[in-house]
Amino acid sequence: MPNLNSKIPLSLYVHYPFCKHKCPYCDFYSIVKPHDSRVDLDYVTRLICEFKDYQKFLAGRKFISCFFGGGTPSLLSVEALELLFKEISPYFAKDCEITFEVNPGTLKKDFLKALKDVGVNRISLGAQSFNDEKLKALGRIHRAKAIFEALELIKDDFRVNLDLMHALPLQTHKEALEDLKTAIDTGVEHISWYELTLEEGTPFYDKPPLIYLDNDHKALLDEEGFALLKENGFSHYEVSAFTRKRRCLHNENYWRFGDYLGLGAGAHGKISLEDGILRTQNIDEVKTYLKEKAQFTTLTFDNDLEDLIFEYMLNRLRLFERCEFKELLFYLGLDNLPQSLNDTLHKAQDLGLVHLDPQGFEVSPRGHELLSDLMILFLPS
Ligand SMILES: C[S@@+](CC[C@H](N)C(=O)[O-])C[C@H]1O[C@@H](n2cnc3c(N)ncnc32)[C@H](O)[C@@H]1O
Ligand code: SF4
């Protein structure tokens, strides 16, 4: 049985499940925000209760990062924001990275000031595209002008990530690269460049829009996009993440298989304890989540080593960085490399997907291209 220890870095994720409008491609859990003046205070009150419930598992550990995702957390009221931070801020480590997801169509100056005052230091701006027709086709509530205005307001006070999607409805190769160039020219330090995926259960999945780029075009676009980012000083450190300064500490902690406490409707968490991993999964239904006594969380102590290794690999292989066995053993709470893992790594090496040596391994360029094939090798037998 792995010996999991509490030295593993711990992050906090807070899910805000409301949006102004539901985008037809999005399968993140969110609903249209009700017109009820109590909604934010009720939600935050529940978040605080949940946070207090988890204290017993944290044993004084502090958060290295905190991420407010959604939904559209930038719709939160200032009053509710301040109430929540009063409770959670004492648990932030020094230099804690605190990120807020912001939809450019929702930004208000007083809210930004409040974010700064409570200690938020990073904003992830959901730009998606700088082309108004594409934004319209994506069902976004904002146009390109709002993205530039938002950037003007935030650039001096926060580190900024910009979310951009490509392979959009009716988007040409040239337009996708123009979007990326515009994102680079804004001067932001971090870009997340996602390929639009058609997610089951969304209107785009049920009635797919016309996407011009086929798989060969997408591969070529990736190649050119990565080169453009590189030329402009961005390092590609994860499948979709690029930075010219600092990485996103919060996401990096997930990819390294760090711990995270997940608060809010639909959120999940992973906390390493002495004898296993505590998993939590909250119901993705705001009404039920708000009822304090409802059965909203599942706790499981998952000690199955093969499953843990698979999950570790699913995350860690996304990072474009050599993995030392020392690091792997630490996050999995092990003393020695299991024989089955050693065998699979040799198999991956024989297939040309990783470079292996006695201290660790690195995903090869072919392994990056065939990442899902590489991941599947680690599936429990
Ligand atoms: C939780 S979402 C959005 C944050 C914020 N609500 C917004 O829309 O501006 C985080 C990011 O995931 C990306 N995303 C959402 N759905 C996607 C999809 N189907 N395919 C690719 N990327 C997606 C978008 O870039 C989005 O900004
Ligand atoms: S993309 Fe953002 S704004 Fe659109 S529905 Fe999803 S979470 Fe809400």
Image (cartoon, rainbow, N blue to C red):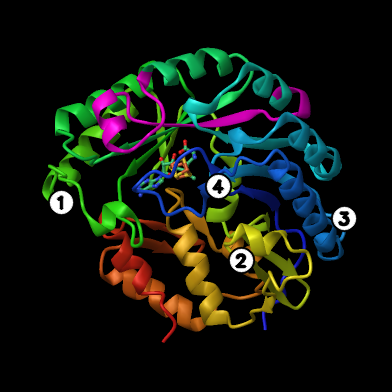
Q: Real-space Cα distance between discs 4 and 1?
A: 27 Å
**Label 1 vs label 2, nearer the camera:** 2
- Using the image as rendered, state which of residue 246 and residue 74 is in the foreground: 74
Label 3 crowding class (10 Å Cα cut-off): few <14, some 14-19, many 20+? few
View quadrant of ligand 2: top left
Displayed quadrant of residue 66:
top right
Q: Earlier in the sequence, mark 4 or mark 2?
A: 4
Secondary element at tag 4: helix
Expressed as whole percent of the image width and height from the top left, the position of residue 230 reads 33, 29
Q: Earlier in the sequence, mark 2 or mark 3?
A: 3
Q: What residue is pinned by disc 2?
A: 283
Expressed as whole percent of the image width and height from the top left, the position of residue 23 reads 39, 43
Over which residues does the magenta segment extend? 116-144
Q: What residue is pinned by disc 4?
A: 251
- Residue type, numbered disc 3: Gly
Q: Earlier in the sequence, mark 1 or mark 2?
A: 1
* Circles 2 and 3 in contact, beta carbons < 8 Å: no
- Using the image as rendered, state which of residue 153 and residue 344 is in the foreground: 153
Q: Real-space Cα distance between discs 1 and 2?
A: 36 Å
